[in-house]
Image (cartoon, rainbow, N blue to C red):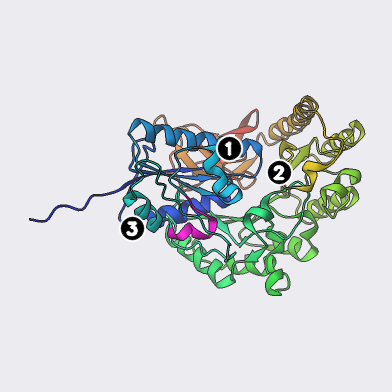
Amino acid sequence: MGTKKQEITVGFVSLGCPKNTVDSERMLAEIAQAGFAITCESCNADVVVVNTCGFIAPAEAESLEAIRRAVDCKLSGSVKKVVVAGCLGERLGLQLLERVDGIDAIVGLDQRDNIAEIIREVFSCDVAGSQLCTTWAKPRAYRVPDDRTRLLITPGHWAYLRISEGCNRRCSYCTIPGIRGQFRSKPREFVLAEAAELACAGVLELNLIAQDTTYYGRDLKFKNGLSCLVRELEEVSGIEWIRLMYLYPTGIDEELIETIATGKKIVHYLDIPLQHVSDSILKPMRRPATKEAFRELIENLRSAVPDIVLRTTLMVGFPGETERDFNELLDFVKWARFDALGCFEFYPESGTPAAQMPAQVPGEVKQQRLEELMLTQQKIAFPKNENRIGSNLRCLVDSVDDKGVCRGRFYGQAPDIDSVCIVENCSAAPGHFIDAKVVAAQDYDLLVEQIYG
């Protein structure tokens, strides 16, 4: 009588940005298709995969902590093998073995789709004594990823749709080109097929992501690449909302604005990371823009799309940032009145030109500026929410708890990063749209009542 083949259990930890989320979903699909059992108990599995982020220092610290937790579980006997994937593994390579002892494999980004084979190899590898089973892919091929066939870890009714990989911008503070490589547009037939696949799985909202979505198609010599692509995506049956994320400001032209204004499914929401507005900071950042260009862009967007919701990301404490530069940034934020704003401190990342620049800003000054900027934005966002009281919104329900309290979003709220709409006594299930009336504001969130009939 034959013996039953041992089933390998895999725990998975996904960290980092939406691009990393897509990589995690692809790996999870490969793991599931290989017949491995995926467990939510990551510290009680045969193999733990940690998909890491390595963009800035806090993300690196979070990734290292997650790896060390997995290794601790291995030392206690509840985990047998630890596999590290993602950006931190790509960035540090075998140096990771010096940072954390006990890693069994490091998987480069180009080896993402081979994760099941790697898990099988690692699990069967005898690591007794000093023998170490390590997988590492160098040099990279910089392929365009095909993200079709994913096991979604977002709610089933919304998903990220990555339209490209890498970045050709050379911002002086950024590690992404060194990690993800040069910009490569995903072929439009791949994007459209993936969108159709997601729609068939019940996805209603597509959130388009890339390092720079406005650059889409330029490497393939497509004119108006992003505009053409989103028009085609609007024809995908089943998709209700298309959201554009990570638009490089100088890449937003009249054609794209017109496409957004006239689109049937493109929500009137744009995520445009500006990073800074002082010309004396933008130049060493290697951001080819000016404050006046930003001002003109915002005015043009609000003129063409009056109900546009604008989100941006800003950086404080870049080398050489003076009090005057920072006050210029504050004044611009007060003028622009962004609907949502994220801010982070500059981190001198190894290998970037900005890390070696003179006039590094002290940590306590960066922290003070971050707090002041976010307080300034709070004084803008809260009254904006109060001004919505009495208005009607169409909301997509994301979750409903056992008390019937629903959390959803109107078009001006992106998943995971923005505020939400809270509905009591909600009759709709997640993945359904409801009509609602705003009855109150609770800090960044909106309290709404469902409209019946």
What secondary structure is found at the residue carrying circle 2?
Answer: loop
Name the residue at the left extreme: 1
Residue 135 drawn at (x, y percent): 46, 54
Q: Which mark is residue 34?
A: 3
Residue drawn at x 80%, y 42% is: 356
State left or right for residue 298 relative to residue 200: right
Residue drawn at x 43%, y 60% is: 114
Give the residues in magenta. 106-114
Which of the two residues, 277 or 311, is positioned nearer the viewer here?
A: 277
The N terminus - image quarter: bottom left
Query: Mark 1 packing: few (<14 Cα in 10 Å), some, or many (20+)?
Result: many
What secondary structure is found at the residue carrying circle 3?
Answer: loop
Provide the residue designation for mark 2. Answer: 350
Residue drawn at x 68%, y 59% is: 213
Q: Looking at the image, tell me whether mark 2 or mark 3 is earlier in sequence order.
A: 3
Residue 360, image quadrant: top right
Q: Which mark is residue 117?
A: none
Q: What secondary structure is the stretch in magenta mostly built from?
A: helix
Residue 113 painted magenta: yes
Residue 153 painted magenta: no
Identity, as a three-letter code, of the amino acid under mark 1:
Val
Residue 144 drawn at (x, y percent): 57, 66
Between label 2 and label 3, give the one nearer the viewer: 2
Q: Looking at the image, tell me whether mark 1 or mark 3 is earlier in sequence order.
A: 3
Provide the residue designation for mark 1. Answer: 420
The relative height of residue 106 versus residue 194 in the rendered view (above or below) is: above
Identity, as a three-letter code, of the amino acid under mark 2:
Ser
Circles 2 and 3, Cβ within 8 Å, touching? The answer is no
In space, the residues marked 2 and 3 are separated at their CA atoms by 38 Å
State left or right for residue 290 relative to residue 22: right
Name the residue at the bottom extreme: 221
